[in-house]
Image (spheres, rainbow, N blue to C red):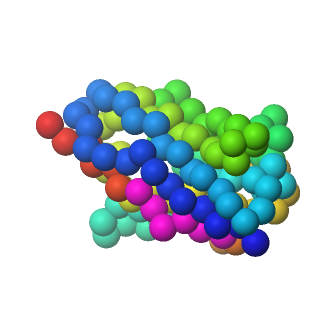
Amino acid sequence: QVQLVESGGGLVQPGGSLRLSCAASGSALANYGIGWFRQAPGKEREGISCISPSGSSTAAADSVKGRFTIARDNAKNTVYLQLDSLNVEDTAVYYCAARWGHSCRVAPSSSAFSYWGRGTQVTVSS
């Protein structure tokens, strides 16, 4: 079983950037596909990006394509999500989640992932 902890959230101005981290413990992250999700107040959780266990396959939702970049460092048991060109609509709690062997061919769906972190808040405001 893998435990996940997100970090790197915060307050940023529109147009700014953040890098989120998802650190794993309890099991080798290299066995898991990782998804990033977000949930804004009053809205459903949205799958925004994912990466396969080896990092060879990634996918992203249309809402973040060209702005958010996912990457992983299996030696450090960490997956990253680089957030660029942020706007106020990106304000949400961001979660990472893991699924054993998930190949990540399309933007992730919450129901496909077994293990979840507690989230990190991203607030975009001037």
Position of residue 60 in the picture relative to residue 7 (left or right): right
User: Is 105 rendered above or below residue 98?
Assistant: above
Q: Nearer the viewer, residue 64 or 51?
A: 51
* Quadrant in which the C terminus is drawn: top left
Position of residue 69 in the picture relative to residue 56 (left or right): left
User: Is 42 rendered above or below residue 20?
Assistant: below
Position of residue 82 in the picture relative to residue 33 (left or right): left
Q: Is residue 69 magenta?
A: no
Q: Is residue 116 magenta?
A: yes
Give the x, y percent position of residue 50.
66, 47
Whether residue 46 is visible to the viewer of this picture, yes or no, is no
Give the x, y percent position of residue 21.
53, 45
* Quadrant in which the N terminus is drawn: bottom right
Give the x, y percent position of residue 69.
57, 33
Q: Nearer the viewer, residue 95 or 8?
A: 8
Q: Which residues are magenta?
A: 115-120
Give the x, y percent position of residue 48.
55, 49
User: Is 118 rendered above or below residue 126?
Assistant: below
Q: Nearer the viewer, residue 111 or 4?
A: 4
Q: Based on the displayed image, in which of its 4 quarters is residue 119 positioned?
A: bottom left
**Residue sitting at 48 percent across and 43 percent down?**
20
**Residue sitting at 64 percent across and 46 percent down?**
78
